[in-house]
Amino acid sequence: GAVVSQHPSWVICKSGTSVKIECRSLDFQATTMFWYRQFPKQSLMLMATSNEGSKATYEQGVEKDKFLINHASLTLSTLTVTSAHPEDSSFYICSARSPGLESNEQFFGPGTRLTVL
Amino acid sequence: GQNIDQPTEMTATEGAIVQINCTYQTSGFNGLFWYQQHAGEAPTFLSYNVLDGLEEKGRFSSVLSRTKGYRYLLLKELQMKDSASYLCAVKDSNYQLIWGAGTKLIIKP
């Protein structure tokens, strides 16, 4: 149980285009989802926290108009990177949490590798 | 500020035991997590400690003793597949996860 999927697993796009990444909790209802970014050989950096049905809370330094997050249902959150630039190339990982699950741990999706040319 | 400290890199021999320490300075404490992350993959959950004690899962154990200052992940009978980064994370008073930079563990034959 507690499986989180992400789609796509990798994407290459041109500079200036927008990319949408989906994060789904497959077998539980995720009241809270997290979006992380990880650059090579660095730790996870939390970008934003989204709660179902409300606006996402962005971490300091993360542009909310550039990284649009929608958590419209208890099983789906989306991250849209708008007007992507090469510096946005990174490994984007989502995780989901449900209060009903033991220890309140976060379950991670497999990640999406974004390359912006 | 809040921060998590763990060794950047450790090397061990196949079949041996290795201990990865984690120290933290956070606003409050609501649990300590260990995750394993292989290169290019997402982290996978290993263990969670909120009370002092030992959590065992196969060859991996996590120990927490806030009174004595012990916080570590113990890996026994190391296998080559254990080569990965091990991330320590602490949940603060706001139930926010604060992440360490990870310890890259290299296993040699």
Image (cartoon, coloured by chain):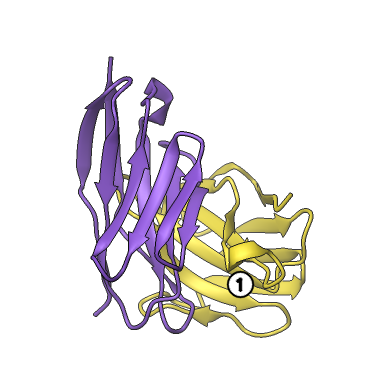
Name the foreground residue: B26 vs A66. B26
Q: Which percent across, then down, holds residue B12?
A: 23, 28
Q: Chain of mark 1?
A: A
Q: Residues within 10 Å of mark 1 (few under 14, many from 20)?
A: many
Q: Please report the residue visible at 71 percent of the width from the left and 78 percent of the height from the top.
A: A52
Q: Which percent across, then down, holds residue A71?
A: 69, 73
Q: Residue B92, located in which quarter of the rendered image?
A: bottom left
**Can you name the residue that lies furthest to the top here?**
B109
Q: Please report the residue visible at 39 percent of the width from the left and 67 percent of the height from the top.
A: B90
State left or right for residue A36 relative to residue B89.
right
State left or right for residue A20 relative to residue B38.
right
Q: Which percent across, then down, holds residue A21?
A: 62, 56
Is residue A84 among what the camera can see?
no
Name the foreground residue: A56 vs A96. A96
Placement of B101 over or under B3, stated as above or below: above
Placement of B46 over or under A46, stated as above or below: above
Disc tally is 1
Q: Which percent across, then down, holds residue B24?
A: 26, 68
Residue that badge 1 annotates: A69
Q: Residue A11, located in which quarter of the rendered image?
A: top right
Is residue A33 among what the camera can see?
yes
Q: Secondary structure at mark 1?
A: strand
Q: Quadrant of the C terminus of chain A?
A: top left
Looking at the colours in the rendered structure, which chain would you say is drawn in purple?
A: B
State left or right for residue A64 relative to residue B5.
right
> What is chain A's hue in the picture?
yellow
What amino acid is labelled 1 in the image?
Ile
Name the foreground residue: B28 vs B39. B28
